């Protein structure tokens, strides 16, 4: 006789979990789409006197993504760049991930940024350029694909589109291999408001197209995280032949990846960190021409993604780490900098329900035990019904 597992949840009452999903534990890389999962880092447990990365669990999680056929996008904002990990730690993350990617035969892209700069010193454009060059040397030397990330320092130093065009022109002339550009909207990082030299997104898009058209041979693609599917589709239509649009839209990814019959988006998504098993199954069905099967697997994950990435969007890392803990992919629910408290118990209880409905909880019994453990914790007790 099947025993239904239940958990008492704030705002939900006694919630019965569904059965364990039957997604495969491994999958080859998709043939028809290029997909990267932006991976989070696992912190060391609280109370050990550190605020550092647990390298064993962090690398194990990357192997989980490679086994499912995803490339790993590392040292990105999902890995708490700008929200907990500094440049020395990022350097070690890139080096370790590069070594593990080689051992696994997995694809790896790493973020190149300027976060070694002290923003309080108001670095100028020349300093921003040199900071990018330093990080480029590391990532290219590691053999990873470069993701040329949007820079807070550049956003502060640039006076208009011409400064962006000039700096990126120099970098794209110097890079050894085609790179992935990066357009991260203000919802993900308010310090990037007005990136590309204009708060008007249509004008910013014109600048992006001008840059890519001039350097199409050095641009593999551009990751766009604006949470605006119509704007992404329009930008995708304007890209030069051979340049990919990697969707970073964690609200509308099923439709954008599927495409319109003429063009589609590839993907570099934070939500793949949390939904890798159903997403891998969905992409395999898409490879087989089974559009209905693709949508049946991936569409139930959208309510979960929209919940995890709800405003303030930049706290989505909390939800991803919580999911990894529920699924036994890390031994505790902690984030660097204490960001596990960035979302309250009501939010995480709703996440638990949506994850169950999406078929994301690999072991419902384990997930239920850990959810109950969290709800009994002091952090959860303090937050229930208090925060939004």
Image: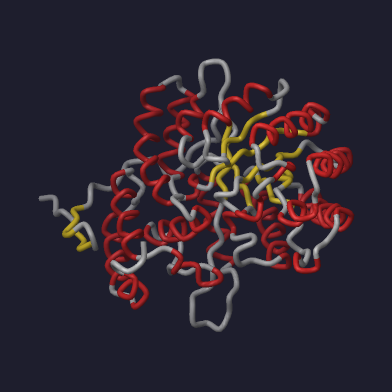
Most distant residue in the left direction: 1
Instruction: Give above or below for 79 relative to 336.
Output: above
Left/right placement of residue 124 relative to residue 182 reads right
Residue nearer the viewer, 202 or 62:
202
Q: Which residue is pictured at 60% across the width and 42% down the height?
A: 71
Q: Which residue is pictured at 46% across the width and 28% down the height?
A: 255
Most distant residue in the top direction: 262
Left/right placement of residue 178 relative to residue 37 reads right
Q: Which residue is pictured at 71% across the width and 55% down the height?
A: 152
Q: Position of residue 179 (x, y in %)?
A: 75, 39
Q: Position of residue 144 (x, y in %)?
A: 73, 47
Give the mark count. 0
Residue nearer the viewer, 70 or 371:
371
Q: Which residue is pictured at 65% across the width and 49% down the height?
A: 193
Q: Position of residue 189 (x, y in %)?
A: 60, 53
Q: Position of residue 188 (x, y in %)?
A: 57, 51
- Tell me the quadrant of the picture where the C terminus can be found: bottom left
Q: How is the image coloured?
A: secondary structure
Instruction: Give above or below for 225 relative to 121.
Output: above
Instruction: Give above or below for 295 relative to 179.
Output: above
Question: Which image quarter: residue 120?
Answer: bottom right
Instruction: Give above or below for 284 relative to 374.
Output: above
């Amino acid at each position: 006789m099947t025993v239904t597992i239940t958990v008492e949840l704030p705002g939900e009452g006694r919630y019965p979990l569904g059965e364990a999903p039957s997604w495969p534990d491994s999958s080859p890389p998709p043939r028809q789409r290029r997909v990267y999962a932006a991976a989070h880092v696992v912190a060391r447990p609280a109370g050990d006197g550190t605020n550092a990365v647990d390298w064993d669990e962090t690398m194990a999680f990357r192997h989980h993504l490679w086994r499912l056929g995803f490339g790993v996008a590392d040292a990105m904002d999902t890995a708490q760049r700008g929200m907990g990990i500094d440049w020395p730690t990022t350097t070690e993350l890139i080096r370790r991930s590069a070594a593990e990617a080689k051992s696994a035969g997995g694809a790896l892209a790493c973020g190149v940024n300027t976060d070694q700069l002290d923003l309080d010193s108001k670095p100028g454009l020349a300093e921003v350029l040199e900071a990018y060059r330093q990080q480029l040397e590391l990532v290219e030397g590691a053999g990873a694909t470069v993701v040329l990330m949007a820079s807070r320092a550049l956003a502060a130093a640039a006076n208009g589109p011409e400064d962006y065009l000039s700096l990126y022109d120099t970098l794209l002339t110097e890079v050894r291999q085609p790179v992935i550009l990066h357009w991260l909207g203000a919802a993900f990082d308010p310090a990037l408001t007005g990136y590309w030299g204009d708060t008007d997104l249509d004008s910013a898009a014109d600048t992006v197209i001008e840059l890519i058209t001039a350097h199409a041979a050095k641009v593999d693609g551009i990751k766009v995280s604006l949470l605006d599917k119509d704007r992404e589709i329009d930008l995708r239509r304007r890209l030069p032949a051979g340049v990919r649009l990697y969707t970073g839209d964690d609200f509308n990814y099923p439709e954008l990846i599927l495409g319109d019959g003429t063009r589609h988006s590839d993907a570099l998504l934070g939500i793949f960190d949390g939904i890798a098993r159903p997403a891998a199954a969905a992409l395999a069905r898409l490879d087989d021409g089974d559009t209905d099967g693709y949508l049946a697997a991936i569409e139930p994950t959208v309510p979960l993604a929209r919940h995890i990435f709800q405003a303030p969007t930049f706290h989505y890392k909390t939800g991803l780490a919580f999911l990894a803990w529920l699924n036994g992919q890390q031994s505790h629910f902690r984030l660097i900098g204490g960001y596990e408290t960035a979302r309250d118990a009501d939010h995480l209880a709703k996440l638990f329900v949506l994850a169950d409905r999406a078929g994301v909880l690999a072991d419902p019994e384990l997930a239920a035990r850990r959810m109950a453990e969290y709800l009994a914790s002091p952090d959860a007790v303090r937050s229930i019904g208090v925060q939004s």
